[in-house]
Amino acid sequence: METKTKVPKIEKNWQIKDRTYMLTGGKAPLSWTIQSKHTARKPLLWFDEELGEQREIRYASNQKSLFVDEQKGNATLAHVVFLDGILEVPKHQQSLQKLLSLYHPKAGEIWTEIDEEAEAMDEVDNIEFELEALNLVKSLDIEHLEAVMRTELGSAVANMSTKELKRDAYLFAKKDPELFIEVSKDEDIKLRNLANRAVERGIIELTDDNTIFRFANGKKIMQVPFDQNPYGALAQYFKTDPGVDLMKSITKKLS
């Protein structure tokens, strides 16, 4: 009676399916042959933690196992060749797949498996992020959009028309939807934008060294804490009792 070979832990979640492999680093030579058997000059070994020993690897198309100590009879050796940087391995070639995915010491270094399911999931996530970002552009009020775009364009937003602002917001949302969503959901972004607009319109002033906000008459509003963004600091000040009154006054003057 034939003894059933124990399945190594590394194969615990192995799935039987067609697999595609690609050379890393954008390499795509007409052909690229990888080492597929152990020799004294060029070792090809896998350390079996369960057995506590190195095991010789030899890929043979007529053998179920990659390990020499489990192979029986004559071994039909076969070359493993990438063509134009790609190697497609059907699901019935399990030993070759396992060599390329699990056991070869160069797996993940010289080549990598193309996980089409994972790539599809990533693409779906990217599309959904993009849709969410584009819908945000459509739903946000113009003041909020201006606040978001100020993080990208700086003070240039002050001279843009509504159409120009929306156009650039759509472009930003399409280019980097995840960042657009993150910025638009920043609870302080509208307050920072208000601070920027107030300085641009001359309602308040920021000293040249970015350390003090003051009114146009020179009266000090607040000292910017060390190592903080001045507009971020003023946004936080707007949340205090005296800051709320200032924020209301600025909002009224800007309207």
Image (tube, helix red, strand yellow):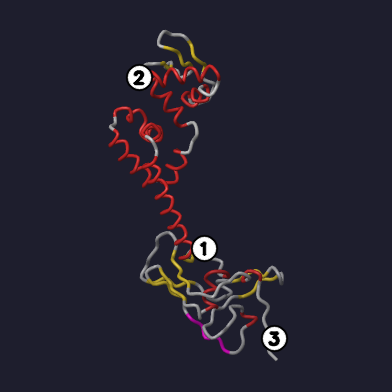
Which of the pair 211/84 is nearer the observer? Answer: 211
- Image quadrant containing the C terminus: top left
Q: Mark 2 points at which residue?
A: 201
Distance of label 3 from label 1 (alpha carbons):
33 Å
| Residues packed near mark 3 inside 10 Å, few (<14), some (14 to 19) or many (20 plus) | few
Mark 2 against mark 1, which lies toward the viewer? 2
Q: Are marks 2 and 1 in contact (CB under 8 Å)?
A: no
Q: Quadrant of residue 207?
A: top left
Q: What stretch is highlighted in magenta?
A: 74-78
In-image side of 102 versus 174 (left or right): right
Q: What residue type is labelled 2?
A: Arg
Distance of label 2 from label 3 (alpha carbons):
85 Å
Q: What residue is at 59 percent from the left and 80 percent from the top? A: 65
Q: What residue is at 48 percent from the left and 11 percent from the top? A: 220
x and y percent of residue 39 in the render? 57, 75
Q: Which amino acid does label 1 sit on?
A: Gly
Does residue 77 belong to the magenta stretch?
yes
x and y percent of residue 92 in the render? 51, 81
| Residues packed near mark 1 inside 10 Å, few (<14), some (14 to 19) or many (20 plus) | some
Q: Name the residue under label 3.
A: 3
Which of the pair 151/5 is nearer the observer? Answer: 151
Mark 2 against mark 3, which lies toward the viewer? 2
Q: Name the residue under label 1.
A: 108
x and y percent of residue 42 in the render? 55, 71
Distance of label 2 from label 1 (alpha carbons):
57 Å
Residue 164 vertical placement versus 252 (above, below): below
x and y percent of residue 7 in the render? 65, 76
